[in-house]
Amino acid sequence: MYGMDYGKHQVPARYEAGEGCLTTSIRIPVRIVVLVVVLPVRMVQDALVVAGRAVERSLLRPLGRGLSWLSGTLVVAPAGWLYESVLTPLGHALRWLAAAVFVWPWAALWRYVLVPGVRYGLAVPVVWLYGAVLTPLGHGLRWVYRELLVPAGRGIRTAVGRVLTAAFVRPVTGLWRYVLVPLALAAAWLADHLVVRPLGWLYREVLTPFGHGVARLLDRLARGIAAVGAGLWAAVGWLVATLVVAPLRSLYRRVLAPVGREIAAAFGVAWRVAGYISRAVGRAVVRLAWNLVGAPVAWGYRTVCTPVGHFLRDRIWAAARRGAVEAGRAARSALRSARETVRRARHDAWRALVGGAPQPEPREPKGPLARSLGSTTTVPSAAPEPEISPPGVKNAERG
């Protein structure tokens, strides 16, 4: 709406010749009606778009930045400090405690009790029993089976097989070969001559011709019914196409399609024209608002507020800031002097109450001197020292 770029749009091209008088007669009224209907909608949409952009630029972005900074200051930083300073050491302590209570005792029990017990109490005896007892016993049993039981079993199996063959197999074979097989052949011959051949003759000579005649009759009836149905269906289709489809097709092609096409084109043209009108109205409103409100406010800001602000900043605020800085420096110096005085007084009071370290005092240097300082007596059996004192002694005497 206000300053929006709609791009370059062109009016739809005219339809080709032969579109009819109905299309030409309804085009202009339809476009006028659609423009009247669409214009308020387009202006409301453009106004909402501009208002949304202004709210997003002036309110939502600063609010989002403030909420982000607030969350980072009040939530993320305390949470990070809590995690690094409290939760991490607490987690390490809990892990060490859990390992000391649950892991290390069971690991020690497994390593120093169960593994040696199973190894030396069960595995070693079982291995010795297998190698020293079970393996030789198995080898002996295998030799007995191969050398004694297998030959004896072969002889017993041959004898038992011959007895079973003479007692059961040969009688059953003779019964099958000389009794059951001849009876079965005789029964098959009788069934073939008394049942199969008569039934085959009946099927070939009677049932097959009768079935062929019935099938031919049914095929002729089906073809006649299909021809009648096809004719009826063609007649019904022709009636439907002539009385229903053709009028509907003509109505769609000559009335509905042109009307719908014109309405769609009218909506497109009206939407673009409404955009131009909305942009013009928006520019007029912006210019009117600038001339009535913005220009006076800008002139007042440049003419009145800016000089007053500069005067307050340079003459009053700068002097007040310098005075505040000097006052702060003086206050800090006074506080520093007061702290130093209090510290010295506290130190002196503490030394007076409990005593302090003894202060070193100047004294005579120890050594084999021929004569002590401040006296004229001479130490017996000592060589006389020079009367000139060392530099350290001179300084001690001066002090």
Image (spheres, rainbow, N blue to C red):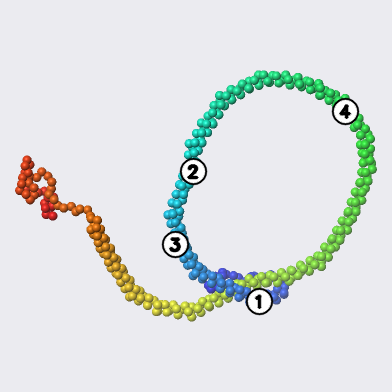
Please give the residue where the numbered disc 1 appears in the rendered image: 33
Is label 2 or label 4 in front?
2
**Mark 2 nearby-residue class (10 Å; few <14, some 14–19, many ≥20):** few
Please give the residue where the numbered disc 4 appears in the rendered image: 180
> What is the spatial separation of the Cα atoms under label 1 and label 3, in whole angstroms?
58 Å
Q: Which residue is most to the front? A: 353
> What is the spatial separation of the Cα atoms under label 1 and label 2, in whole angstroms?
85 Å
Asked if the residue at tag 3 contacts the one at tag 4, i.e. Cβ–Cβ closer than 8 Å, the answer is: no
Q: Residue shown at 50%/68% (left/top)?
A: 60
Q: Residue shown at 13%/55% (left/top)?
A: 399
> What is the spatial separation of the Cα atoms under label 2 and label 3, in whole angstroms?
41 Å
Say which quarter of the image contains residue 137: top right
Task: Classify 235 as above or below 210.
Answer: below
Give amino acid for label 1: Val
Question: Residue 226: x, y in percent?
Answer: 87, 56
Question: Residue 363: x, y in percent?
Answer: 13, 50
Secondary structure at badge 3 equals: helix
> What is the spatial separation of the Cα atoms under label 4 and label 3, in whole angstroms?
108 Å
Upstream in the sequence, badge 4 or badge 1? Answer: 1
Please give the residue where the numbered disc 2 appears in the rendered image: 103
Say which quarter of the image contains residue 85: bottom left
Q: Residue shown at 85%/58% (left/top)?
A: 230
Question: Residue 336: x, y in percent?
Answer: 28, 64
> What is the spatial separation of the Cα atoms under label 2 and label 4, in whole angstroms?
83 Å
Please give the residue where the numbered disc 3 appears in the rendered image: 73
**Mark 1 nearby-residue class (10 Å; few <14, some 14–19, many ≥20):** few
Secondary structure at badge 2 equals: helix
Judged left or right of residue 206, residue 68 is left
Upstream in the sequence, badge 4 or badge 3? Answer: 3
Judged left or right of residue 270, residue 155 is right
